[in-house]
């Protein structure tokens, strides 16, 4: 049975409609995207008095899951209603951004430490694939898979196997495991050369294992790539089929789970609340005005949409949500998968990604599949840029196309005490989002985010509050 945490009036969440002009908060958070909800939860656990507001009537902001299906049609301005072949509208919960969780990644650690996992159920994504010369192949990540893969010739397989063994054995504290390589000086190009790996292997290693979006990493120190491949392998080792997890009922469940965490530790929530003004005094934030009332604060955390004068556009991402009645061909009819199309395969600067989920994840009507293709925009015809991905998905029953501007803060908050999140990028995981969360945490709190210290704080200072 679904753990319903959508309704803010449920037990444990303080939900208010009006502001009190004489009430001051340590932190006001604007927007209920995943970044904002995680920070709200963490701040509450750390003992901060938090007010969390959103102009929308639903959780998630740009990381929301839209339900029912009729609302998705309205959001994308499609005429009419969904056809009867789509089933019941309330059986759909469609993500606006396509992302999975790395099983051994930072977001899963945050979920476990805060015990937000109690509000969520996850499924393992069934496969990870890479595109080569018009076909897709399973990504080999173990010695056995590498030797069996048709991606490589027999000699290349042996060299790749030796490379994987090197990465698996690498230990920053044991110089012997480095085999003469200084990972902080040697580039990834140097490391590939050491193992005599060809272009095809370099492509899927850098893009399907290390999950880089471009080839810039080749001329940077190889330590980051080694750690990325280890994360992929360790995540894969957790469950076997792939390194990725996905929450039942959609990604929108994630911000809601952290919202409940914040509420348990005293956070107050106000949805459907228009933000009229961020009140400043001498260049520093002192409050937020809504419907003629002001709530005062010492610090403000928000997404870019609330402070467009303090962010700059850094690019665009194109995403196409595709509804289908079939799994993706040549994947063994799996209910979920990821496909990476390396940029060099389609003459691009950035990779194209496909994330597919289905009715097995309680996000679509029975027998239906949702695949979301995405990439960084490079031309004046973004939809055409995703054609190699869409060709893999045909026939497609319905498409929903979005082109989103990407923003980064120009104000880092030192003087203003306004701390702004970055727009969700084109990666298919949440590692960069977690990096942003840790960066904002450091600027807000003045100390590094420490997973172990966070767990101690929750358990020692607040006792059993987290078990309510």
Image (spheres, helix red, strand yellow):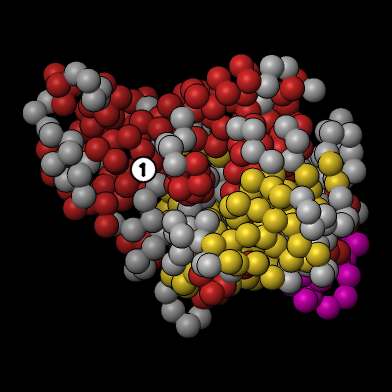
Q: Is residue 188 above or below residue 79?
A: above
Name the residue nearer the viewer: 190 or 369: 190
Name the residue nearer the viewer: 113 or 168: 113
Q: Is residue 169 above or below residue 214?
A: above
| Total count of labels | 1
Which of the 4 image quadrants contains residue 294?
Answer: bottom right
Residue on which disc 1 sits: 210
Q: Quadrant of the N terminus?
A: top right
Question: Magenta region: which residues?
Answer: 73-87
Across and down, in percent, residue 25 comes to: 69, 48
Residue at 26% in and 52% down: 217
Across and down, in percent, residue 13 comes to: 83, 39
Q: Secondary structure at mark 1?
A: loop
Q: Is residue 276 above or below residue 212?
A: below
In the image, taking residue 392 as reference, residue 219 lies left or right, namely: left
Name the residue nearer the viewer: 268 or 209: 268
Across and down, in percent, residue 113 comes to: 59, 25
Can residue 20 be seen here?
Answer: yes
User: Per the image, is 85 magenta?
Assistant: yes
Q: Quadrant of the C terminus?
A: top right
Name the residue nearer the viewer: 98 or 306: 306
């Amino acid at each position: 049975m679904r753990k319903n945490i959508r309704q803010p009036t449920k037990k444990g969440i303080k939900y208010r409609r009006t502001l009190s002009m004489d009430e001051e908060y340590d932190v006001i958070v604007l927007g209920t995207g995943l970044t904002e909800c995680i920070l709200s939860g963490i701040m509450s656990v750390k003992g901060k008095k938090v007010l969390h507001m959103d102009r929308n009537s639903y959780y998630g902001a740009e990381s929301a899951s839209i339900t029912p299906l009729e609302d998705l049609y309205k959001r994308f301005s499609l005429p009419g209603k969904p056809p009867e072949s789509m089933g019941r509208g309330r059986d759909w919960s469609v993500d606006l951004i396509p992302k999975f969780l790395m099983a051994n990644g930072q977001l899963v650690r945050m979920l476990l430490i805060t015990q937000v996992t109690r509000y969520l159920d996850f499924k393992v994504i069934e496969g990870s694939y890479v595109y080569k010369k018009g076909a897709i192949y399973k990504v080999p990540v173990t010695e056995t898979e590498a030797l069996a893969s048709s991606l490589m010739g027999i000699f290349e397989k042996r060299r790749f196997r030796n490379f994987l063994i090197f990465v698996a054995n690498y230990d920053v504290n044991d110089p012997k495991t480095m085999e003469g390589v200084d990972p902080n000086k040697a580039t990834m190009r140097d490391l590939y050369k050491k193992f005599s790996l060809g272009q095809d292997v370099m492509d899927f290693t850098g893009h399907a294992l290390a999950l880089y979006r471009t080839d810039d990493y080749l001329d940077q120190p190889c330590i980051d790539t080694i750690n990325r491949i280890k994360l992929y392998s360790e995540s894969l080792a957790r469950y076997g089929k792939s390194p990725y997890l996905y929450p039942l009922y959609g990604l929108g469940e994630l911000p809601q789970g952290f919202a409940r965490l914040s509420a348990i530790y005293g956070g107050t929530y106000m949805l459907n609340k228009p933000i009229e003004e961020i009140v400043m005094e001498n260049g520093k934030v002192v409050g937020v005005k809504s419907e003629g009332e002001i709530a005062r604060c010492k610090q403000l955390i928000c997404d870019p949409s609330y402070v467009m004068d303090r962010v700059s556009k850094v690019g665009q991402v194109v995403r196409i949500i595709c509804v289908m009645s079939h799994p993706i061909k040549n994947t063994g009819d799996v209910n979920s998968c990821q496909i990476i199309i390396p940029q060099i395969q389609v003459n691009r600067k950035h990779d194209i990604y496909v994330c597919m989920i289905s009715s097995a994840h309680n996000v679509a009507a029975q027998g239906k599949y949702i695949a979301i293709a995405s990439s960084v925009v490079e031309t004046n015809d973004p939809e055409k840029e995703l054609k190699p991905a869409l060709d893999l998905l045909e026939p497609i029953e319905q498409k929903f196309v979005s082109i989103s501007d990407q923003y980064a803060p120009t104000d880092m908050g030192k003087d203003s005490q306004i701390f702004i999140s970055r727009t969700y990028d084109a990666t298919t995981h949440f590692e960069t989002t977690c990096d942003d969360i840790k960066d904002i945490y450091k600027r807000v709190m003045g100390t590094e985010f420490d997973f172990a210290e966070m767990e101690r704080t929750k358990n020692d200072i607040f006792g059993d509050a987290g078990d309510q």
